[in-house]
Image (tube, helix red, strand yellow):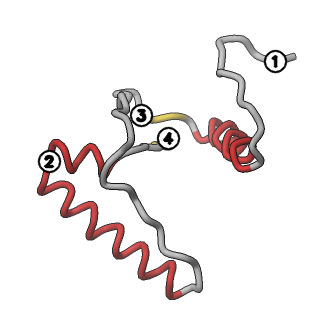
């Protein structure tokens, strides 16, 4: 089992698959109803992007990579610079 994280999904669907975009908006509405019922602000998925993203075909990663996503989010939230991921393991 792996973890799949996608950025710009609705924007991509809006450009390439109107039926898929409608389905995705319905799914997001369901998620937002649950969030709001629990006192959490609704999520807003952008339907357009300021610049085009290249969606990676390799979109499944092991759950152990979730640590790196959390770290990137924490750094971004605090306004700290990120260093690009490399092929070397830190020691």
For label 4, the crowd category at 10 Å Cα-Cα, with few meaning under 14, some 14 to 19 and many 20 or more, is few
- Relative placement, left or right, of 4 versus 73 is left
User: Which of the pair 2/71 is nearer the observer?
Assistant: 71
- On residue 90, the disc is 1
Image location of residue 80, percent across then percent down:
77, 38
> Residues under labels 2 and 1: Cα distance?
41 Å
- Relative placement, left or right, of 87 versus 43 is right
User: Which of the pair 52/83 is nearer the observer?
Assistant: 52
Q: Which residue is mark 2?
A: 17
- The numbered mark, 2 or 4, whose residue comes first in the sequence reads 4
Label 1, secondary structure: give it.
loop
Label 3, secondary structure: give it.
loop
In the image, residue 44 above or below residue 7: below
- The numbered mark, 1 or 4, whose residue comes first in the sequence reads 4
> Residues under labels 2 and 3: Cα distance?
19 Å
In the image, residue 59 above or below residue 8: above
Mark closer to the observer (1, 4): 1
Image location of residue 82, percent across then percent down:
71, 30
Q: Which residue is mark 4?
A: 2
- The numbered mark, 3 or 1, whose residue comes first in the sequence reads 3
Q: Which residue is mark 3?
A: 59
Label 4, secondary structure: give it.
loop
């Amino acid at each position: 089992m792996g973890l799949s994280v996608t950025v710009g999904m609705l924007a991509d669907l809006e450009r390439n698959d109107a039926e898929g975009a409608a389905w995705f908006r319905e799914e997001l509405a369901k998620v937002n109803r649950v969030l709001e019922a629990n006192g959490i602000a609704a999520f807003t998925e952008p339907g357009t992007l300021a610049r085009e993203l290249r969606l990676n075909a390799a979109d499944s990663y092991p759950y152990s990579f979730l640590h790196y996503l959390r770290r990137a989010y924490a750094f971004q939230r605090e306004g700290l610079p990120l260093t690009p991921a490399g092929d070397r393991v830190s020691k």
